[in-house]
Amino acid sequence: AQSVAQPEDQVNVAEGNPLTVKCTYSVSGNPYLFWYVQYPNRGLQFLLKYITGDNLVKGSYGFEAEFNKSQTSFHLKKPSALVSDSALYFCAVRDLYSGNTGKLIFGQGTTLQVKP
Amino acid sequence: EAQVTQNPRYLITVTGKKLTVTCSQNMNHEYMSWYRQDPGLGLRQIYYSMNVEVTDKGDVPEGYKVSRKEKRNFPLILESPSPNQTSLYFCASSLEATWNTGELFFGEGSRLTVL
């Protein structure tokens, strides 16, 4: 079965430091991978995706993610964290085995806390 | 402004009292879907709709119904709510051309508590 794991419930980082939010996946075949962000009392917002091509994907708000096929990982990164980056982050993979359902399989989420 | 609108945003109800959570999008999207979010479980798909009058079950459809009579609306119906349906619900939509690349647009969520 396809799955996504975010091994850290929470990541704490000081403002100005680099941040990494980890994601690993398990799929058969080529994965379609995504990151979404959820700010308090808001819906999820799309950040970036990897479908094919360059392993380093750039997205919104200065975030980027690196696809690593050998390690089956898709970690979210940012060179310099901002307090306003504090939010709940979800990694997701498209379910390629459910036909044309458009379904995304989400990880359990990681809370990012950036302290001033 | 392009958006997905859900109502109500917050609701406390009692077991067995039918309720409907409305979802409307103004982007002419063909694909719409409902997810529920529970702590430690991420988001799980309840139902989805590929187009008007085309709906199908997701991973956790038990206790829910949906309808898609118009392209813009996709209501979620709980005929007889139970406490295990206490959750945060999200409606999402996508263009038919892009749904399979996963860029979904989400509503702001509806927090439902069933007593």
Image (tube, coloured by chain):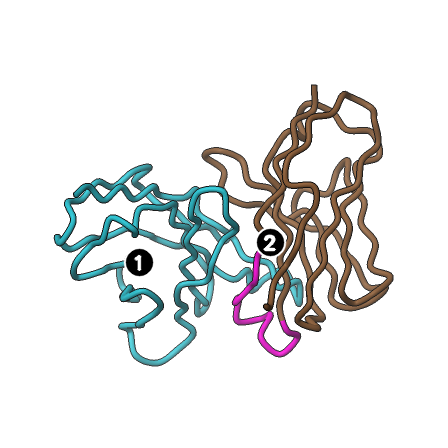
Q: Chain of mark 2?
A: B
**Quarter of the picture holding the N terminus of chain B:** bottom right
Dot 2 and dot 1 within a common chain: no
Q: Quadrant of residue A52?
A: bottom left
Task: Judge whether residue B98 is colored magenta.
Answer: yes
Q: Colour of chain B?
A: brown
- Image position of A70 (left or right of B74): left
Q: Position of residue B88 (x, y in %)?
A: 59, 38
Q: Colour of chain A?
A: cyan
State whether residue A85 is above or below residue A64.
above
What's under tag 2, amino acid-wise?
Gly
Q: Position of residue B29 (x, y in %)?
A: 68, 71
Q: Which residue is mark 2?
A: B107
Q: Quadrant of residue A26?
A: bottom left
Q: Nearer the viewer, mark 2 or mark 1?
A: 2
Q: Position of residue A79 (x, y in %)?
A: 17, 61
- Image position of B6 (left or right of A43): right
The residue stretch that appears in magenta: B95-106
* Residue at the image point whose x is 39% and y is 54% from the top: A25
For the residues labelled 2 and 1, the Cα–Cα distance comes to 28 Å
* Residue at the image point whose x is 53% and y is 66% from the top: B102
State whether residue B93 is above or below residue B5.
below
Number of residues whose C-alpha sits closer than 10 Å to that of mark 1, classed few (under 14), some (14–19) or many (20 or more): many
* Residue at the image point whose x is 36% and y is 46% from the top: A87
Q: Which residue is mark 1?
A: A73
Residue that extends furthest to the top in the rendered view of this protein: B115
**Quarter of the picture holding the C terminus of chain B:** top right
* Residue at the image point whose x is 79% and y is 59% from the top: B55
Task: Judge whether residue A87 is colored magenta.
Answer: no
Number of residues whose C-alpha sits closer than 10 Å to that of mark 2, classed few (under 14), some (14–19) or many (20 or more): many
Along the line of sight, the residue nearer the viewer: A33 or B27: B27
What's under tag 1, amino acid-wise?
Ser
